[in-house]
Image: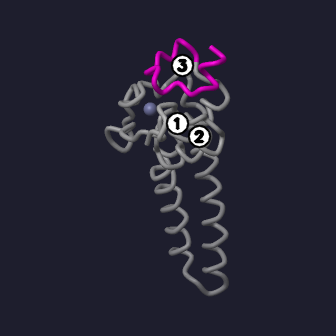
Amino acid sequence: MRDRTDEPRPLTLPLLLRRGVTVRCPLCGGRGLFRRWFTMVDRCPRCRLRTERIEGHWLGSLGMNTIVSFTAVVIAMVVGFLLAYPDGSLTAAVVFVVATAVIVPIAFFPVSKTLWSAIDLAMRPLEPDDDVDPRWIPPVSRHEA
Ligand SMILES: [Zn+2]
């Protein structure tokens, strides 16, 4: 959503993270970055921000997804153990842990991509090479350019 004024909002870290967590474009807040669950478009349909800004861009999202998934598996193991101990079903606990290990990385995949893009934009502000729609260049980046 654009503000009442014509200026795009300054890209503060909370705004970037909120857009990342809600699978929106970190620059303009637009949707439509995914064609399918695993297929991302090359550029944001609204502001033209490239989704893969540099080669190796997605290593960060891969790392984040791995950390989140392993954390979820460890939590699932603890919960599964507590539910199974001492007389519960070990099979149910194992199924719970395996289901967590399969579902969490898939479910978190789009969020890991947009959240990493938001963190990347916080660490590496827009550059002329990004070639975005100038209407979406935030005030701070415009002054730095
Ligand atoms: Zn955008």
**Disc nearer the start of the sequence (3/1):** 1
1 or 2: tag closer to the N-terminus: 2
Assign ligand 1 to one image quadrant.
top left
Q: Nearer the viewer, mark 3 or mark 2?
A: 2
Disc number placed over residue 26 in the picture, else none = 1
Quadrant of the frame with the C terminus: top right
Q: Name the residue carrying label 3.
A: 55
Q: Are marks 1 and 2 in contact (CB under 8 Å)?
A: yes
Corner quadrant of residue 20: top right
| In-front residue for pair 56/82 | 56
Which amino acid type corresponds to the residue marked 2 in the rendered image? Leu
28 relative to 85, above or below: above
User: How far, Cα to Cα, is label 3 from label 1?
Assistant: 18 Å
Residue drawn at the location 54% of the way across and 48% of the way down: 21
Q: Which residues are magenta?
A: 127-145
Q: Secondary structure at mark 2?
A: helix
| Residue found at the far left of this picture | 35
Residue 17 placement (x, y as % from top left): 60, 44
How many angstroms separate mark 3 from mark 2 (CA)?
A: 21 Å
Report the residue marked by disc 2: 16
Left or right: 69 in relation to 86: left
